[in-house]
Image (cartoon, rainbow, N blue to C red):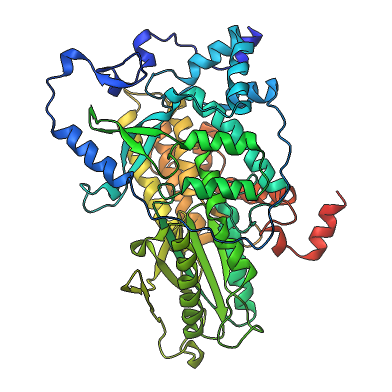
Amino acid sequence: MGQTSEFNTGNKPLAPGDLVPRSLKNHRTNPQGSLEPRPEESHVGVRLPCQGQTTARSWFPNNAPRAEEVPYLFPPLLTREFKSVTNKEVLDTLKECSSDNAPGISGITYCVWKWVALVAPDQLISVVRASIKLQVHHPSWKQALVAVIPKNNKKDMALPKSHHPIQLIECLCKLVKKIVAQWITYNLGQYKLMPFNQFGSRSNSSCLDTAMALTHDIHSAREKNLVSSFLAVDIKGFFDHVDHNRLISVLIHLGFPPEITDWVESFLSERFVRVQVDDCIGELHPQKVGAPQGSPVSPILACVYSSIVLVLLNHCPIFDKTGSDSIPVAPRTLVDDYRFLACSQDLETNIFTLRKTLEYAVDILLQIGMKIDPDKCNLMHFTWRRGSPALGHHKNPLLVTRLYRERIIITAPKSIRWLGFHLDCKLSFTHHVPTLTKKGVAIVNGLKVLGNTIAGIGPANLRHLCKTVVVPAITYGAPLWFNPDKPNRKLVRKLEQVQHKALLQITGGFYDLPAEALQFLTYIPPITSTLTKLFSSAATCIPRLPLSSEVTKRLPSSFLRSVLTL
C-alpha cells in the first residue's frame, strides 16, 4: 500500500477504452507506429482532412526564414561534464506528473507509466537513462497529434492564427523531456548562461516577478518626477521559427555536453505531425523548423535560442537624446513576451527611445529568423502630471515607425492587458480589479448550473470550487496593488462582494445574511485575510531568489545584508 500511495493513479479502475482519447477511438496504429483511420471509417469525406492539411502548412512551413549566425560577445565556453540521470530523479519527476494529462497517439497516459514504475521500475529507468545517454529520440516519439485549441476574443475563427497548435506527445517521451528541461534549467541558472531579465523558463520566477519589477521601476521614476512609457510586443510564432542548426550551435557555444546537444538534435530532426480538425485527423506533415508546442523542453530551448536579443540589448543599452546620463531603456521578457520601459522628463523623449529600441530588437530578431506581431504591440504612458508643459506637444503621443516595409502606428489606450494584468496610466489598478470581479461574477453564476440546495453537487464540492476557481480568479496579481498597512478599501470591497455572492451560492442563504456568518459556516476566511496571505507569500519568496534576479536587484542594500546573514 505504501508504494501505491506514492504514485497516485486514482481510485477508479480504468476500462481499456478509457486509456484512449475519444478523438482517437476511430483510428488505429499500424505496425510502423503511424496513425490511420479504421477500415469502417474510411468513408468519411475529405473536407475536414483538407482543412487539417491547410492548417498544417500554415503552422509548419517547409521553408522558414533562414537564421544567421549572430556572434556572441564572449568566446565559446568549456564543455561541461554530463552526469547520468539518477533513479530518484526519474521517479520523482514521474510522481510530479499529473495522471490526467492528455496522452499521445498511443493513448498511454501517465497513469499507466506510474503502474509500470511500481512493478518494473528498473526497466523504466533504463529506458529513460538510455535515451539521454545514447542521444537517441525514438522514432515513434517523433510523431505528434496536433490539437486545435481556439483563442479567446478572435473575430475570424477560420484563420489558423486564431488557434493554438498544441501537440499531444507520448507521456514517456514527455517524461524524458522533463528531465532534460530540468538539467538545462539548472545549468542556465548555475552558470548564468541566460540573462536574468528573461523571467520565463527559469526556476523561482513567475509572471508576478515580472510585474513587480515593472511596477517598481514606474514608481521609482515617479519619485524622481519622471514619466514612464511602456511598450509590450509579442513574437509571432515563437516556437515555430526556431532554427534547428542555429539552436545546436548556441548550445555548443554555451558549453552544453554532447549528450544534451546530440539529444536535442535527434529530438528536433525528422519530426512529423498530424493536425486534428474536429473529429478527423489529417495526413502526416513534416516539421522541419520550430520546436513543438506542448513539449516540456520547448520553452527553455526557445528562450535559449532567442537570448541573444537580451544579451545585445543589455550590452549596448539605448539612451534617449540627452546621452548616457539618462536612464536607459529596460528590456524584460517572459518567454515570447518582450517589454521595454523608458523613463525621462517627457513622453516625446520616451517615444523616441522606444522607437529606437524596437527597431534594434526587430533587426536582431530578423537575423535569427523571428518576427514580432504588429497587431499585438501595446503602448502605455504612466504619468501623474496634470496639464504640465513637460508632457510634450501631445498628452498621449503615438509611436510611429516602419516595420517589415510597412508603416506601423501604436496608440496608447486608457488601459492595456499584459500577462493578465490590466494596467492603467496611473497604475492604480482601478481597471484591473473590476475586470477580475466581472470574471468572478461570471464564474459564480456558472456554479448555479452545477448545483443548488435541491439538486446537483453538494455544498462541499461548491466550496471546493469557490476556493480553487473563484478566489484565485479575483485575487490574481493582488500583491501588486494590495498593501496590508494601507489597503485600498474601494478595491477590496469589490472582491468582498464577489466572495459574498459565492458563499450565498454554497450555503443557499438569504442575500442579507451577514458575511461573518457565511464565512463561519463555510470555513472560508475573509477576502482581506486571503489578500494578506498572498502579500506575505510573495514577500517570503524574495529571500529565495538569486542575487542576480531582477527583483533582488531592486531591493534596498539593508535588506540584502539581512538576507545574507540568514
Q: In this view, does 424 lie to the left or right of 43?
A: right
Q: Which residue lies furthest to the right in this view?
A: 565
Q: Is residue 199 left or right of residue 56?
A: right
Answer with the quarter of the image where residue 510 lies. Answer: top left
Give the image location of residue 511, x and y in percent.
38, 42
Residue depicted at 40% across the width and 34% down the height: 271
Give the image location of residue 203, x and y in percent.
64, 44
Residue 482 drawn above or below residue 86: below
Give the image location of residue 135, x and y in percent.
58, 29
Residue depicted at 48% across the width and 82% down the height: 352
**Is residue 481 at least partly visible in the picture?**
no
Q: In which quarter of the image is the N terminus?
A: top right
Q: In this view, does 318 lie to the left or right of 564?
A: left
Give the image location of residue 341, x and y in percent.
54, 70
Q: Which residue lies furthest to the bottom in this view?
A: 389
Nearer-the-camera pick, 325 or 300: 300
Residue 397 drawn above or below residue 119: below
Residue depicted at 34% across the width and 45% down the height: 442
Answer with the quarter of the image where residue 51 lies. Answer: top left
Q: How many labels does the image show?
A: 0
Residue 382 drawn above or below residue 465: below
Residue depicted at 61% across the width and 36% down the height: 260
**Is residue 52 at least partly visible in the picture?**
yes
Nearer-the-camera pick, 61 or 563: 61
